[in-house]
Image (spheres, rainbow, N blue to C red):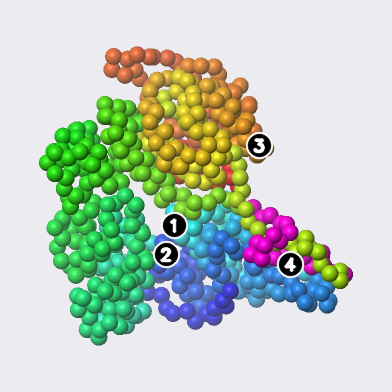
Amino acid sequence: MVTDQPDAPPLVGRGAELALALAVLRGGRHLLLEGPAGVGKTRLALAACAALGRGAVRVDGDDRYSEARLVGWFDPPAVLRAGYGPATFTPGPLVEAMRAGSVLLLNELNRMPEAVQNVLLPALDEGRLGVPHVGEVAAAPGFAVVATQNPSEYVAAGHLSEALRDRFEHAALGWQPAAEERAIVAAASGAPPALAAWAVRLARASRSHPAVRRGASVRAASAAAGLALALSPDPGPAERAAAAAAALRTRLDLRDDAGAAFPSVLADLLAAAEELPTRDGPIEIGPHGEGMDGDLASAVESALKGLLPLGPPEVQPPARVDPNEALRSAKLPEDGWRLAASLAAGDLRWMDEDVRRHAEQLAAAAVLQRAHRLVGPLRGPTRLERGPQRSPDDGELDLETTLDNIVGKAIADADDIVVERRVEQRRQVVLMVDTSGSMAGENMALAAVAAAVLALKVHPGDLAIVAFSAEARHIVGIGEQPPVREIVRRLLDRPCAGPTDIAAGLEAGAEQLALGRDPRRSAVLISDGQYTVGHDPRRAAARFPSLHVLHTLAAERNARPGGYWITPVRQAGADVARIGGGRLVPVRSFAELPRRMLDVADMVLR
């Protein structure tokens, strides 16, 4: 916890954002600042406090932050002498800010556990907080909460609950214009204009490089300029390259399947920063972004004949390559994504077994990459569990319960020492995915991303997945623990075709869910709610304790050329969710299906 006085350094730019922040705080409301790391969220918050003449009590969040650290705690020796009460209570940052009428600045709020976030609700709503053994704490005039968070796709970042987000006004911060970034770098590093401009070009080039998932911030540019100056008062190319390598190594997040290592990416960025033309055109784009040319099927066919490489130009296979090696060289995400769509459409079944296996691996990797980018932390929600301490590093001491246990005893028992530990909150979930003809191609690839999102959030062994069209079968059963990539591969291995029997999918899903032992188990259905064969699914929906429907827009169900089925379409999506005791979540386009799945996963697992 750090208490900042209202003397933060002046902002460069951000006039509109500062005006919004001041309006929110003057109106007695709370502010959530969201944007990538390094865009100045904390500095903006401190500048707003300085403009209003308010102090700021700063807290840096992480997933081990506890409710007691935020609210306050009791001093054990004092409690043993005088008992519980205000005199033995040490206020935490929330109580301190409320009593002083200060701003509570919560850095990276979405990294804190959900239970800690929920402690804020009464303070945000009513300016009041009940503290056991102390009484009610009322906020003094001027109290407000300013929270910052990185986008949820960042590692270790989670999602705020709907209830908590509803208490904040929102301001999004993006990258500032180049001129403002040059001024920031010059002020932070003391670099002359030319060097500051070089450092800003370096950072900005990283944000558009195709091999980089998340580029460098102005903080990285300041570091590069400062390091170059430290190496030489007049840094040349060698000093600038060394400074760039040191500043960017820890700040660039490279794409897993981009086919480029840090040294080659650094070379591209240095060429851009020095304003040298690269061999592939625009200075901000390196040589690693080329995709396959032409139609996918013809590209794959040519590759099998050894005529066309699938990878970046520096990976040039010989004239007669092994088809497996040709597919292995297809590292770019767009190649794998196009393969995923083609696999789901059944267009690549003509491949021989070995080549198809490599195509499936590339496709699964591309799908999983999209899911990882969306999910962020590879952990589900947690719950607080209290119990006797089992080892010296077992959880965080539950001081109040431990004191209650040992007061009046000459010798404490082993079970008197009670700790709080966070354990993963487990839920059994079954996902039922429509794999009928309307899902063929990219629709199914996006459904596979959605399935991967859920698989990354659910504890291994707690997820079952059922694929259904005219018939249904599970591709992952409750208790199985295949890697997420294998789950994706199995989904893509089932080409989408035929009519839709939602009832069959629900029946198969209910059978799997019955194997779970958690009474709060849930089900998720991906479907447009229209069925063309089978029984009415409403009766099957009643078998679920909680059934949520990701309701995709209805697809055209015309007969294919030379058609082989034309059947009446019946709608049941809304009724299935209502009868199943869940929610109907509209999905306006398949592109937003993975994001809506993330929302449903957080709701189901909470």
Dot 1 alpha-carbon crowd within 10 angstroms: few under 14, some 14 to 19, many 20 or more:
some
Residue at image location 41% in from the left, 51% down from the top: 373
CA distance for labels 3 and 2 = 41 Å
CA distance for labels 1 and 2 = 9 Å
Q: Which callout, 1 or 4, points at the residue further toward the start of the chain?
A: 1
Q: Which residues are magenta?
A: 383-408
Question: Which residue occupies the foreground of this view, 195 or 296?
Answer: 296
Going by the numbered disc 3, the residue's amino acid type is Arg
Decide if residue 118 is in sight here. no
Residue on which the image places disc 1: 154
Residue at image location 16% in from the left, 34% down from the top: 305
- Whether residues under marks 3 and 4 lie with C-beta atoms below 8 angstroms apart, the answer is no
Dot 4 alpha-carbon crowd within 10 angstroms: few under 14, some 14 to 19, many 20 or more:
some
Residue on which the image places disc 3: 517
Which x, y percent locates residue 209? 27, 57
CA distance for labels 3 and 4 = 33 Å
Residue on which the image places disc 4: 399
